[in-house]
Image: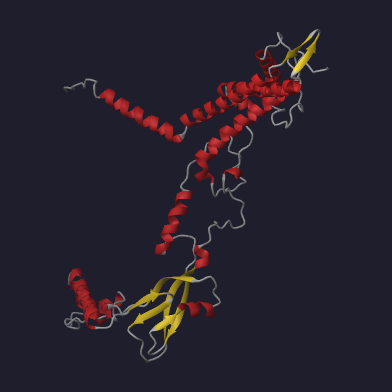
Amino acid sequence: MNIPIWPGSSSFFPGDTPFGFYDNDYQFQQDADKFAKFASQRLGYPLVEIELQDINFYTALEEAVTTYGNELYAYQVAENLLSFQGASTTIEPGNNELVQENLAAVVRLSSQYGEEAGVGGSITYYTGSITLLPGVQNYDLKSWAISQNISGGIEMKRVFYEAPPAITRYFDPYAGTGTGMMQMMDAFGWGSYSPAINFMLMPISYDMQKIQAIELNDQIRKSQYTFELVNNVLRIFPIPTGGGIHELHFEYILLTDRNQPYVDRNGQSIITNASNVPYENPTYNAINSIGRQWIFEYGLGIVKEILGYVRGKYSTIPIPGSEVTLNQGDLITAATNEKTALIERLRSYFDTTSRKTLLANKAEEAQSQMSILTDVPMTIFIG
């Protein structure tokens, strides 16, 4: 049985890994052969034979580096996704960039609340009008929408149906007393109203009380200029009378706009989720010693796994007068446990460096410093 055996040394060349992600990185080229020697000796070479070739070690190292980068940048994406969403997918890869937090996602959310008050949001307000008919109090807005070729329904936002302003019925007994105030009011655009003197001489509270008195009088003694909207039927008060053509104006939105869940991209390709945040495989020579040690340990776990599968195919090897049983099961079990533990350790390490944890630690540190300073004797200065 001719099983390939690790010869004890190797010489890496670009193209020896499956994907070639890091083949042109000089530091990776140097570490590839060092890792092969490290992993083989950890597996017992030269005391035992290792049924692997150099490309198996290179494959394990490439996978370990890629796994490290995947865990690192997946954490970065999760930490900063709200800042990424909405940005163009053509921005530079974020591998070596310091992410600047922004409030874009918060503003998008808050603006949708603002649209209910007509002061923001992404929904267009439209205007429409109906003709008031003498003696007709109820108007079917659903029929109006159909007549305007509007499908999907509308939602009324504002009806411009108000009583004439109280100021137009404000009577000032002191107006026109020869003080020349009328001409002054014309300069301010108030010439069509009566209280010329009070605008200039009386406190503003006096005018407000007079206006409130007029409005309260209208509310109690007269039919109110108001409306109610029930099941798309607009009922107005008081009932319209004759005397010319009058139109009632209103603002509305389309229900199809309100139910639109997607942001208008304006033809741009933008970041929408974790899958299209621009991160690439890490630059190997930029990974520090902490990261590389993890990569070597994880790579060793992969090598154990590969060797276990190989020895599973050749579970027993005949020797003169007997046969040798290989440790396929032990290798695969150890590899699985080690890889799982390394992933958990790396994620735990990233958690300790999260923005939330770092800020909490800083706050705790500041509190501890304040506690210490309270026990420090204060110097009394005498000038």
Vertical arrangement, residue 45 with respect to residue 93, above or below: above
Quadrant of the image occupied by residue 288: top right
Quadrant of the image occupied by residue 362: top left
Q: Nearer the viewer, residue 105 or 171?
A: 105
Q: Residue at x 70, y 11 (%)?
A: 45
Vertical arrangement, residue 197 with respect to residue 245, above or below: above
Question: Would residue 96 be seen by someone viewing this image from the given angle?
Answer: no
**Lateral position of residue 24 relative to residue 2, left or right:** left
Q: Residue at x 19, y 72 (%)?
A: 209
How far across and down, in percent of the image, does residue 327 sit? 68, 17
Question: Would residue 149 be seen by someone viewing this image from the given angle?
Answer: yes
How far across and down, in percent of the image, does residue 78 sit? 52, 39
Vertical arrangement, residue 251 with respect to residue 116, above or below: below
State how many labels appear: 0
Q: Residue at x 53, y 66 (%)?
A: 256
Q: Nearer the viewer, residue 179 or 97?
A: 97
Q: Nearer the viewer, residue 51 or 209?
A: 51
Residue placed furthest toward the right: 1
How far across and down, in percent of the image, does residue 332 sit? 65, 23
Image quarter in which the N terminus is found? top right
**Lateral position of residue 206 relative to residue 51, left or right:** left
Residue placed furthest toward the bottom: 243
Q: Which colouring convention does the figure follow?
A: secondary structure
Residue placed furthest toward the front: 321
Image quarter in which the C terminus is found? top left
